[in-house]
Amino acid sequence: MAQTVLIHVMNEDAIVGEIEELPDQNAPFLKVSSPRLRDGRDVSYFLPETNIVLIPWTRIHSIEIMPTEGEEKLVTFIRE
């Protein structure tokens, strides 16, 4: 099952995409399918027809794993 991730690339806008599984700790790159910007537009430095990209770990600052449809939302209460 593909997981949607938000990839923070150094000195670039964040990229949204899907990964099939979490990468191995020794992998030199991250394989991402359907790369796009957060608002759904094409990433300017990829060709519009690009479907899969390999991003080297040296360019990635951090990755956020987005919740899937089946996961529960955590509800918290804040006292005022």
Image (cartoon, grey):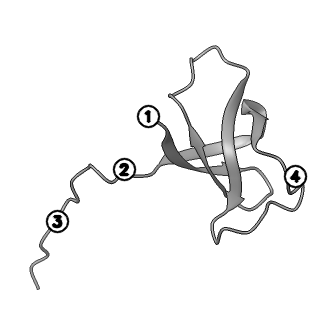
What distance separates the C-alpha of mark 3 from that of mark 4?
Answer: 38 Å
- Circles 1 and 2, Cβ within 8 Å, touching? The answer is yes
Circle 4 residues within 10 Å: few <14, some 14–19, many ≥20: few
State the SS at label 4: loop
The Cα atoms of the two marked residues, 4 and 2, are separated by: 26 Å
Q: Residue furthest bottom?
A: 80
Amino acid at circle 1: Met
Q: Amino acid at mark 2?
A: Thr
Circle 3 packing at 10 Å, graded few (<14), some (14-19), many (20+), is: few
Between residue 79 and residue 17, name the one nearer to us: 17
Near-viewer residue (21 or 78) = 21
Callout 2: few (<14), some (14-19), or many (20+) C-alpha neighbours within 10 Å? few
Q: Which of labels 3 and 1 is toward the front? A: 1
Q: Of the residues shown, which amino acid type is indicated by label 4? A: Phe
| Residue displayed at 77% across by 38% down | 53
Q: Which mark is residue 75?
A: 3
Secondary structure under tag 1 reads loop
Q: Position of residue 54 (x, y in %)?
A: 77, 33
- Looking at the figure, which quarter contains the N terminus? top left
Kindly identify which residue carries mark 2. 68
Residue at mark 1: 1
What is the spatial separation of the Cα atoms under label 3 and label 1, in whole angstroms? 25 Å
Report how far apart the C-alphas of labels 2 and 3 lie in the structure.
16 Å
For marks 2 and 3 on the same chain, the one whose residue lies earlier in the sequence: 2
Compared to residue 57, the image places residue 70 above or below, namely below
Which one is earlier in the sequence, the residue at label 3 or at label 1?
A: 1
- In the rendered structure, which disc, 3 or 4, sits on the residue that comes first in sequence? 4
- Which numbered circle lies on residue 46? 4
Q: Amino acid at mark 3?
A: Val
